[in-house]
Amino acid sequence: MRVLDDFIECENDVHLDGRVALVTGATSGSGLETAKKLAKRGARVIIASRSSAKLSDAKAEIIKSSGNENIVTRTVDYESLKSVRNLAHEMYLFETRLDILINNVGAIALEDRLTSDNLHLMMQVNYFGAFLLTFLLYPLMKSSAPSRIVNVSSLAILLGYIDLDHVNDVGFPTFTYYANAKLASVLFTVEMNKRIQGSGVNVYSMDPGLIKSKFFRHSNNTFWRSFLNGVLMLFGRDPVRTAAMPVFLAIDPGVSNASGKHFRDCAEFYSSWFAHDPVLTKRLWDESKRLVGITPEEDWELHLRPTLA
Ligand SMILES: NC(=O)c1ccc[n+]([C@@H]2O[C@H](COP(=O)([O-])OP(=O)(O)OC[C@H]3O[C@@H](n4cnc5c(N)ncnc54)[C@H](OP(=O)(O)O)[C@@H]3O)[C@@H](O)[C@H]2O)c1
């Protein structure tokens, strides 16, 4: 049976029985629809987010829409790296494999402050949390290969800039951090791809376009919150449609040779010239490892890739 993905370029007939997928930020918007699509194709889907009440509502909605009861909820709060480590730990404890990881958590208009991990809150929620989770889950994904990682980014990368000496400084407008964090997720995709080549794990980044969601709900400014959420409701794409893209990248055989690339509308898309700067992507990788505190025990690069030290 052919599974239509509501978006013509993204169609394929891949089924996921026996496969395990983790979708972060799957309680609303595009993440929730992504989880539904993966469930519809037969995967065991783990949905992770910070509110257990929202997670149980999302689980019920996914089961209802897909008929697949193999849905697991996991709480994680990206404001805390300990919580991200705990999610990774639970994955190793309760799952025997991980075929698909969709890094979808994202937020804007959060407070302009550092977290208890000494990273800027916006950078941690939109980049460092996903970096840490992906780094920790890589060995599990490698043992489940062929497997795929999809990093949900944004068109905002075109306004992003990575200054590693000031990446966590406070005092900038929220959109600056958002653009920088989403650019970092694209650069991390490029660098990770170089480091894991031949492992059978593919990694992609993508821009979903504007999404019909309440993405600006965290803003304290009533006018901007209503206005910008209104713009998304008017001009955004239906999340059912934007979710077709991460699913396409997670399963389509046609992109198996396009690891490390950036996509939009299920086709390769221009990313950013910073992504072509190998010195910057390497520095970002090394600095990200340092800032999230990767320990020697967690550092698979020490064990698996001695030649790239
Ligand atoms: N909306 C757009 O127009 C747009 C455009 C380009 C790219 N994007 C990107 O697309 C992705 C999905 O966007 P969306 O509009 O569908 O978002 P959304 O509806 O706001 O959903 C975001 C998800 O992330 C979760 N989340 C937020 N902060 C978290 C934290 N600290 N810890 C754990 N989970 C957290 C949310 O949980 P809670 O409900 O508990 O907050 C929710 O499940 C994001 O990565 C976003 O940056 C969005």
Image: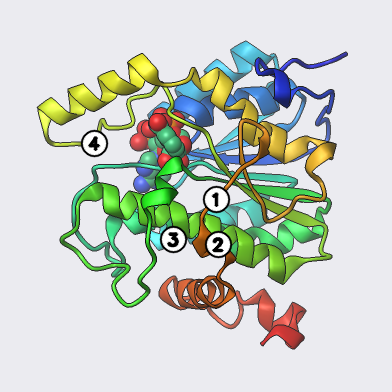
Q: Nearer the viewer, residue 157 or 205?
A: 157
Name the kind of residue labelled 3 in the image.
Phe
Q: Tell me what residue is drawn at x 63 percent, y 36 percent.
A: 246
Asked if the beta carbon under badge 4 is closer than 8 A to the nearest atom of ligand 1, the reply is yes
Name the kind of residue labelled 2 in the image.
Ala
Give the structural element (helix, strand or loop) at label 3: helix
Q: CA distance from mark 2 to mark 3?
A: 17 Å
207 up-or-down from 62: above or below: below
- Residue placed under numbered mark 4 in the picture: 218
Q: Nearer the viewer, mark 1 or mark 3?
A: 1
Name the kind of residue labelled 1 in the image.
Ser
Residue 275 circle label? 2
Give the structural element (helix, strand or loop) at label 1: loop
Q: CA distance from mark 4 to mark 3?
A: 19 Å
Residues at discs 2 and 3 in contact (Cβ within 8 Å): no
Q: CA distance from mark 1 to mark 3?
A: 20 Å
First of labels 4, 1 by sequence position: 4
Res 217 quadrant in image? top left
Name the kind of residue labelled 4 in the image.
His
